[in-house]
Amino acid sequence: MSTAPASQKIIVVDFGAQYGQLIARRVRDLHVYSEIVPCDVSADEVRALAPAAIILSGGPASVYADDAPSLDPEVFELGIPVLGFCYGQQIMAVTLGGTVGHTEVGEYGAATLRRCDGGASLLYGETPAEQTVWMSHRDAVAEVPEGFVVTASTDTCPVASMECAERRLYATQFHPEVRHTACGDELLRNFLFGVCGLEPSWKMDSIINDAAEAIRAQVGDARVILGLSGGVDSSVVAALCAKAIGKQLTCVFVNHGLLRKDEPEEVEAVFTKQFDVDFVHVHAEDRYAALLADVVEPEEKRRIIGSQFWNEFFAVAQDLAEGGRPVKFLAQGTIYPDIIESGARKTGGKASTIKSHHNLIPFPEGVSFELIEPLDHFFKDEVRALGTTLGLPDHIVHRQPFPGPGLAIRIIGTVTRDKLAILKEADAIVREELDEYNAACDPESRVWQYFAVLPDIKSVGVMGDERTYGYPIILRAVESSDAMTADWAKLPYDVLGRISGRIVAEVPGVNRVAYDVTSKPPATIEWE
Ligand code: XMP
């Protein structure tokens, strides 16, 4: 193993937004700090960043396309180790005098890789002679540059990887950063710790300290406002900002009266007792009740609830300004998948004055904030880990998805206080029982999301010799990984029976429970 370099930083040169972040994430998982830089970075800029190593990402272009991104050739002359993946290998090849051609057939998906390095490649180290890798390419390196050797191939890709160990330049046509590449992590580990001599020292505490430092540097002594829903992402941003800037942060919790039982109290307790921030609990229950009084149409409910949230939120910002505490920044819990899904922005600069954003409605005339989005390069599981390290309780960190419009879209028809009271009680029983069921299950068989729905119908029942005419409760419990598709959970009959028995016995006004056995598609998870 070489001696540890002074710098412990990796830079990931991004040739296509989706790829760079996943590589950075894998590097973080191995406890090494990484920064993403755009592919037009110059050699002088790289020198100034002084990384211990450079990783070149994949990308969608063909190296020979007119507008194909290239890399400053001087980057390869800096004496810094470089590892290229896919497009990164092709860029390395053409920049250093090799050639890239079209393969007869593209190669997409799993492929069997055969090492031909005689066991000498530090990148492959102790990994097997044959291994499964993930390919996604049409072009491929045809001739390696002078000084390079081919270290592995597949049936359709003669140069599946190449290296010039003397100059510490390595590249693979496949993607070690994706999970389908069996030894992907090991290859990365071999590069970072074996070839570059880095130490796995960048842990969760360092991530939090660096993020807090970045927030302090961005904000200075200005005031920051945050819309807190009690969901994982906004709660983690709040905890992070609390650590970074304490009382300069105002958390605005708009209580629309549509949250689950005990939830407003739990959110308030965490952010007033555990974190030292300015916390504003906006009691908007009456205003929401009035606005929703006659509304039946689901999209109309969503629109009203969303736009009233911003009315409430801007009113607090205005109060703060009038009280001599003007707000300059808006903190948001945008996480990396949000950006990918919206396709809205590229990686890079953190602060931008918003005009439109997938999370936001347009600001009123004269209102503008700069954004702080400290989670914008993290994945959901990393955000949860950050939350735990920051001291957030499990019931917030491991919260199941909950829609912004809350229980209003789980009450079919008009939303009234009576119906809300019924649904909150029934939902609390569903959660209690299924939390317990999940705790006893192995992780793969746990139910992913579960809740109660109150339809707009009544039926006849009999309780204690009395006729009843009450609401049914629909139980919805699904298995999913990303909410894009879902299947109804095959819950044991005794669990279903217990939930049904408890709801009918404990929630006045309910005399029947039905279980929704529909997948998504054709249904959706929520009823509205
Ligand atoms: P559907 O009903 O479309 O829901 O199958 C998919 C997932 O998204 C959640 N959901 C929402 N989450 N704001 C949110 O933050 C919303 O307006 C919203 N609507 C649905 C839903 O709970 C499920 O997990």
Image (tube, rainbow, N blue to C red):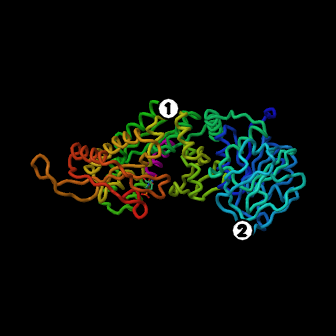
* Position in image of residue 324 (x %, y %): 52, 39
Q: Residue at x 82, y 62 (%)?
A: 142
Name which quarter of the figure residue 390 lies in: top right
Specify the quadrant that holds the N terminus: top right
Residue 223 magenta-drawn? Answer: no
Sequence-first tag of 1 and 2: 2
* Residue 420 x %, y %: 29, 49
Q: Which residues are magenta?
A: 309-322
* Left or right: where 336 falls relative to 70: left
Which circle marks residue 275 in the picture?
1
The residue under label 2 is: 105
Side (left or right) of 513 relative to 157: left
Camera-nearest residue between 9 and 361 = 9
Tell me, yes or no, if residue 214 can be seen here: yes
Q: Main secondary structure of the magenta part?
A: helix
Q: Residue furthest left?
A: 465
Q: Is 319 included in the stretch rendered in magenta? A: yes
- Splitting the image into four quadrants, where does ligand 1 fall? bottom left
**Type of the residue with mark 2:** Val
- Whole-angstrom CA distance, mark 1 to mark 2, is 58 Å
Kindly identify the amino acid type of the residue bearing the numbered disc 1. Answer: Phe
Which mark lies nearer to you, 1 or 2?
2
